Structure formats: structure tokens, C-alpha cells
Image (cartoon, helix red, strand yellow):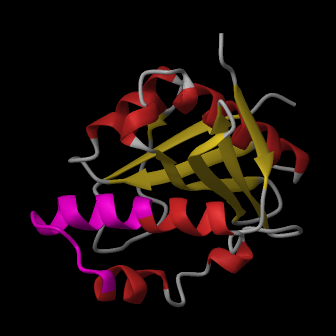
Amino acid sequence: MTNWVIRPEHVDTPAATALRRDYYDEVASRYWKRPATTAEIDDGLDGDGAERLAAPTGEFVVGRYGGEAGSCGGVLMLDAVTAELTRVYVRPGFRGTGGGAALLGALEDAAVGLGSERMVLNTRLDLVEARTLYTRGGYAEIPAYCEGPYMDIWYGKDLPR
């Protein structure tokens, strides 16, 4: 049986960069209802704040399945006790292998390690796979804690201490 191995990784390693590009390609293409161009992906990633996903403000992780990079995600500390889940992605070929749940658990552990007591996130209604992952992971809908053009629904969860 192959297991997921999820470890912290800087956002600019080759594997993390490729996963971040795939993530942005998928969410942008779904939003625009057409394939995103390379230039649009480059523009979306330029200045996206991913550099904050490193201690002490956050953490970024890459998940490998059978040694192949297949998932990523980050946590960003919003304040001393609240972390935001962000850039959660499992490549389509790895979906259904338990990678989403493993990724979510690793990100929650990272948030607790950074001092977080609560995790929040925002997503879009069309990202059904993500919403399913979050609700299965114990996240419940909460009032909006931020605003933006790509936000339709907000979730939160208290983390174990």
C-alpha cells in the first residue's frame, strides 16, 4: 500500500512551484469557464503573497504519493490564534487516494504548531471537491471574515490543543 508523505517545503521549490501553477490553472480555468493561459497563470501567481507561507507567519507543505508530488497547501496566521487554510490542492490523478484528508490533517498540525487554536478558510461554491473535503474534515460554515471577488462561502473549525 502506498501512503502519502506530507512535509513542509518552500513555495519556490520545483515541486511546490509546479503544484501552485496547477492549482491556479484549475481554479482560474473553472472560474473563467475556459483554459487559463500561461500568462494568466504567471500573472495570478505574481505577488500572490505565497512567501508569507513560511515561519513565523505560516507554512507550506507538499504531499508525495509513491514519491511523486501530488498535493500542496498552506496555512497563514491571521492573528495570534487564527490560521487561514489556503492553496489546498490535490492533483486530479491523485484524488480518491486519501490525499486530501492527509493534507488537511498535516495543515491543521502545522497551524497548531504555529500557535493556532482555530482554522478558517474561504472558497467558491463551484469548487465542490474542496467543499466536500472541508465538511468531511469537520469544518462548518461561518460568517464571512474577509471579502474578495473569488469568495462565496467561509468555513471554520476549532483545532485541538
Check the image and name the residue furthest to the front: 67
- The answer to whether residue 18 of the structure is visible from this angle is yes
Q: Is residue 32 above or below residue 63?
A: below
Tell me residue 1's x, y (percent).
65, 9
Q: Residue at x 54, y 21 (%)?
A: 98
Tell me residue 9's x, y (percent).
78, 59
> Which of the pair 139/26 is nearer the observer?
26
Check the image and name the residue furthest to the left: 33
> Which of the pair 130/122 is nearer the observer?
130
Tell me residue 42's x, y (percent).
41, 85
Q: Residue at x 28, y 46 (%)?
A: 127
Tell me residue 26's x, y (percent).
31, 58
Check the image and name the residue furthest to the top: 1
User: How many marks can you see?
Assistant: 0
Residue 152 placement, left or right of 159: left
- The answer to whether residue 151 of the structure is visible from this angle is no
Read off the magenta span.
Answer: 22-38
| Magenta span includes 14 | no
For the stretch drawn in magenta, the main secondary structure is: helix
Residue 126 placement, left or right of 148: left
Residue 1 placement, left or right of 132: right
Work out which quarter of the rendered image holds the C terminus and state it.
top right
Residue 49 placement, left or right of 22: right
Q: Quadrant of residue 156?
A: top right
Q: Residue at x 50, y 21 (%)?
A: 97
> Which of the pair 109/11 is nearer the observer?
11
